[in-house]
């Protein structure tokens, strides 16, 4: 029986190979699909995403990446708010189930929460949903963020292409795409505890968002072949008054992110070819040495060894 959709790009037109992949993906051609469910996108093991590439590099490692990919975790409550804000702002995404409880301390509330999750919904307590609505309203009313999401746009388009240097199939899923004269604008919406520019800088470093920027930009170039591409981050605070920071990454940081992606793709290609997914150390014959972070070596040397 032929598959209903390509297990890589979600294409329903076919024709399909015996592995359940459409001929376009089999040939390594760029492909795009709108409306692909998020769970199917994230469950794909025939391509690598931005989060996967970031997980391959320190402080992650191939062994942890492989285990996490083979053992997907159940939905976490900490991500519910972000998913719900995306649904409210973008108009697509997982359905929100608003539960009329103050907390999950009662069995009835817990049962309602579990039932919602089983139905593929995002369960939110009433006060949490009000918080989501306030955050979405803040985005719409913001002088910079609001216009980015206003008017026609494409939400959560899944895009697939083959990295020419390694032959690895890659995928990205921009939150929002706007087609402007001579420009394709990609907007990434992130919820955070602190949306101050200083906190945003730290988040870019800690979560390697410069890798995300580079891969998404490259994916859009490969799949849509636009005249130009820009990638913009929108950070919205979870706490009132839900302040917002809109920023575009500097070119140098994007190039660093691209270099990180290139290294991660080489690691992924080598691991896939060899079937070996090493930890941080890899095969060694001697126990490696370790020391303080370089900045602290300098600090303590100046303080204690002068």
Image (cartoon, rainbow, N blue to C red):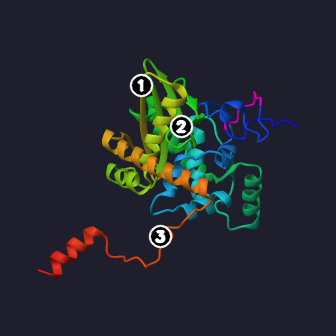
The numbered mark at residue 174 is 2
Residue positioned 62% across, 31% down in the render: 31
Camera-side residue of 29 and 107: 29
- Give residue 302's quadrant in the image: bottom left
Q: Secondary structure at mark 2?
A: loop
Graded by Cα atoms within 10 Å as few (under 14), some (14 to 19) or many (20 or more), the crowding at tag 1 reads some
Could you give the CA–CA distance between mark 1 and mark 3, rounded to whole angstroms? 41 Å
Which one is earlier in the sequence, the residue at label 1 or at label 3? 1
Q: Position of residue 281 (x, y in %)?
A: 47, 70
Could you give the CA–CA distance between mark 2 and mark 1, rounded to whole angstroms? 16 Å
Q: Are marks 2 and 1 in contact (CB under 8 Å)?
A: no
| Main secondary structure of the magenta stretch | loop
- Is 243 one of the magenta-colored residues? no
Relative placement, left or right, of 291 versus 58 is left
Which residue position holds label 1?
Answer: 228
Graded by Cα atoms within 10 Å as few (under 14), some (14 to 19) or many (20 or more), the crowding at tag 3 reads few
Q: Position of residue 42 (x, y in %)?
A: 64, 47
- 2 vs 1, front mark: 1
Which residue position holds label 3?
Answer: 281
Which one is earlier in the sequence, the residue at label 2 or at label 1? 2
Which one is earlier in the sequence, the residue at label 3 or at label 2? 2
Could you give the CA–CA distance between mark 3 and mark 2, rounded to whole angstroms? 34 Å
Camera-side residue of 251 and 85: 251
- 1 vs 3, front mark: 3
Q: Position of residue 148 (x, y in %)?
A: 45, 30
Considering every residue shown, the one lying at the far top of the view is: 181
Magenta stretch in the rendered image? 9-15
Q: Are marks 3 and 2 in contact (CB under 8 Å)?
A: no
Q: Secondary structure at mark 3?
A: loop
Considering every residue shown, the one lying at the far right of the view is: 1
Rendered position, 81 above or below 282: above
Residue positioned 37% across, 42% down in the render: 254
């Amino acid at each position: 029986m032929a598959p209903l959709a390509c297990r890589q790009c979600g294409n329903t037109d076919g024709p399909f190979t015996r592995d359940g992949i459409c001929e376009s993906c089999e040939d390594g051609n760029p492909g795009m699909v709108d409306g692909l469910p998020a769970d199917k996108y994230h469950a794909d093991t025939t391509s690598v995403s931005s989060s996967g590439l970031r997980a391959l590099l320190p402080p992650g490692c191939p062994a942890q990446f492989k285990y996490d990919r083979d053992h997907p975790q159940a939905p976490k409550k900490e991500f519910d708010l972000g998913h719900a804000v995306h649904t409210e702002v973008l108009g697509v995404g997982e359905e929100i189930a608003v539960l009329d409880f103050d907390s999950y301390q009662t069995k009835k509330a817990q049962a309602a929460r579990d039932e919602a999750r089983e139905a593929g919904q995002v369960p939110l307590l009433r006060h949490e949903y009000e918080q989501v609505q306030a955050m979405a309203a803040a985005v719409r009313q913001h002088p910079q963020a609001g216009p980015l999401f206003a008017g026609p746009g494409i939400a959560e388009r899944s895009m697939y292409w083959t990295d020419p240097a390694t032959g690895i199939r890659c995928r990205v899923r921009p939150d929002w795409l706007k087609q402007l004269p001579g420009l394709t604008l990609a907007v990434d919406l992130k919820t955070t505890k602190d949306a101050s520019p200083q906190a945003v800088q730290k988040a870019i470093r800690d979560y390697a968002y410069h890798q995300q920027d580079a891969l998404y930009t490259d994916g859009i170039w490969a799949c849509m072949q636009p005249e130009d591409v820009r990638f913009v981050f929108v950070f919205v605070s979870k706490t009132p008054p839900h302040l917002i920071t809109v920023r575009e990454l500097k070119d140098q940081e994007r190039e660093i992110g691209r270099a990180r992606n290139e290294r991660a793709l080489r690691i992924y290609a080598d691991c896939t070819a060899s079937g070996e997914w090493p930890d941080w150390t890899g095969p060694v014959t001697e126990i490696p040495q370790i020391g303080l972070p370089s900045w602290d070596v300098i600090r303590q040397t100046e303080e204690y060894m002068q």
